[in-house]
């Protein structure tokens, strides 16, 4: 009976080890499930931010003149024709005002470019193009409104000379040349870092390589209820959740690895002995008859069998029961008796310890 007391205590120990393992495993699974759920909910509910806003654009310019005998002022106001030969500089003033109807942390970027275009005789296909950035400003922070006022000096003669040289070099009598002064505005959330601009919000069109110049522009533009769509990309919180998931997965791997080491150390030869006994009783109890007194094999020729499975084959061949006797919890004898022959398999606890010691 001693074996069964030890087995009972051992079973409780195994259950305790398994219970600790299950608790750790379930705990980590719950954390992983929570993090994954958070990521899924965040991404499912993430929608682009749609903002309505009003904008007003005012574009003004003055044409400054070179010394001449006809004009007493050194500049002329907008909205008239100019003689190209006496143009010195063109000073352009861009004013941009916008009012967003949703408070948010916005970043504005602005850029002004001079884009020289020489077009073919159909005035659509570009023969030559050159762009210079005259002004650029990044990271203008605001949470609601933006007001920009910028003066830009344009060297008319520089671009006019380029256009003349190109047209004369290739005898392009029908070519049309223009200098476009473009204002670009980009707005985005403070969490994003876009670098490209869309179409210009205002353009000043200056003809080149002509005797007279008539500058075209929409001097005043008011746009109401325009729509701004800000793409909400993965937030810092989302990245933190993913990092937490990776850390938890690593912790789970380490925990399982350490638990395997811990369990392997806890499983002694007696554990293996007990499991083997439990396995045999579970699967072959119908073939086994247990006795509580030592089996008298005097007068029998004894054959020692190496394994229970071999003894089972002998039992099947002879159609005899297997008799089992437990000796003080340290040895179990399985015997098949036939005539004057005893086929005996001994499961000895000491052999299990010796086997483990030999493998170390």
Image (cartoon, rainbow, N blue to C red):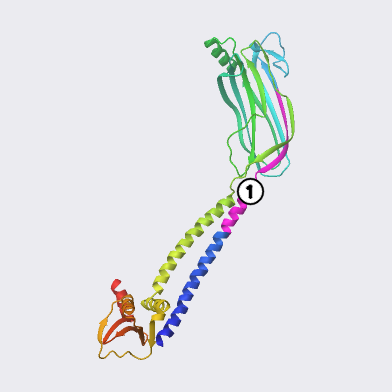
Where is residue 308 drawn, in percent x and y?
A: 33, 77
Residue 167 occupies which quadrant of the picture?
top right
Residue 314 shown left or right of residue 118 in the figure: left
Taking depth in this image into account, of 71 and 126 the one nearest to the observer is 126
- Extent of the magenta region: 34-60
Residue 326 shown left or right of residue 33 in the figure: left
Residue 188 shown left or right of residue 20 in the figure: right
Q: Is residue 325 above or below residue 197?
A: below
Split into 4 quadrants, where in the image is the N terminus? bottom left
Where is residue 101 drawn, in percent x and y?
A: 73, 41
User: Would residue 302 be seen by someone viewing this image from the given angle?
Assistant: yes
Q: Would you name the residue on which mark 1 appears?
A: 46
Q: Is residue 300 above or below residue 181?
A: below
Tell me the residue at 44%/68% (across/down): 259
Tell me the residue at 36%/77% (across/down): 269
User: Would residue 330 be seen by someone viewing this image from the given angle?
Assistant: no
Count numbered badges in the picture: 1
Taking depth in this image into account, of 221 and 90 the one nearest to the observer is 221
* Magenta span includes 132: no
Residue 91 occupies which quadrant of the picture?
top right
Could you classify mark 1 by the number of other residues whose Cα lies within 10 Å: few (under 14), some (14-19), or many (20 or more)? some
Where is residue 241 drawn, in percent x and y?
A: 56, 54
Split into 4 quadrants, where in the image is the C terminus? bottom left
Element carrying mark 1: loop
- Hey, which residue is sitting farthest top in the picture? 69
Tell me the residue at 60%/31% (across/down): 136
Q: Is residue 247 above or below residue 359?
A: above
Where is residue 299 drawn, in percent x and y?
A: 25, 90
Residue 121 shown left or right of residue 332 in the figure: right
Taking depth in this image into account, of 127 and 267 the one nearest to the observer is 267
């Amino acid at each position: 009976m001693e074996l069964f007391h030890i087995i009972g205590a051992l079973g409780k120990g195994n259950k305790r080890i398994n219970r600790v393992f299950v608790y750790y495993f379930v705990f980590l699974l719950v954390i992983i499930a929570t993090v994954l759920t958070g990521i899924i909910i965040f991404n499912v509910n993430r929608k682009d931010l749609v903002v309505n806003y009003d904008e007003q654009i005012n574009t003004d310019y003055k044409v400054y003149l070179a010394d001449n005998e006809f004009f007493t002022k050194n500049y002329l106001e907008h909205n008239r024709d100019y003689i190209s030969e006496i143009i010195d500089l063109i000073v352009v003033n861009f004013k941009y005002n916008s009012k967003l109807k949703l408070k948010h942390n916005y970043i504005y970027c602005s850029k002004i470019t001079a884009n020289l275009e020489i077009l073919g005789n159909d005035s659509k296909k570009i023969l030559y193009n050159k762009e210079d950035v005259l002004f650029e400003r990044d990271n203008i922070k605001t949470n609601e409104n933006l007001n920009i006022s910028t003066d830009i000096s344009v060297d008319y003669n520089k671009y006019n000379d380029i256009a003349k040289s190109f047209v004369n070099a290739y005898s392009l009598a029908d070519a049309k040349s223009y200098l476009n002064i473009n204002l670009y505005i980009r707005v985005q959330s403070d969490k994003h870092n876009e670098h490209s601009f869309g179409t210009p919000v205002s353009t000043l069109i200056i003809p080149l390589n002509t005797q007279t110049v008539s500058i075209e522009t929409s001097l005043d533009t008011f746009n109401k209820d325009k729509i701004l769509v800000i793409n909400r990309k993965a937030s810092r919180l989302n990245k933190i959740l993913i990092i937490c998931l990776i850390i938890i997965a690593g912790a789970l791997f380490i925990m399982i690895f350490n638990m395997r080491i811990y369990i392997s150390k806890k499983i002694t030869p007696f554990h293996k002995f007990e499991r083997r006994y439990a396995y045999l009783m579970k699967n072959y109890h119908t073939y086994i008859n247990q006795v509580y007194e030592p089996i008298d094999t005097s007068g029998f020729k004894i054959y020692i069998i190496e394994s229970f499975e071999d003894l089972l084959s002998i039992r099947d061949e002879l159609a005899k029961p297997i008799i089992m006797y437990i000796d003080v919890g340290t040895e179990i004898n399985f015997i098949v008796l036939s005539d004057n022959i005893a086929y005996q398999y001994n499961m000895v606890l000491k052999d299990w310890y010796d086997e483990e010691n030999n493998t170390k």
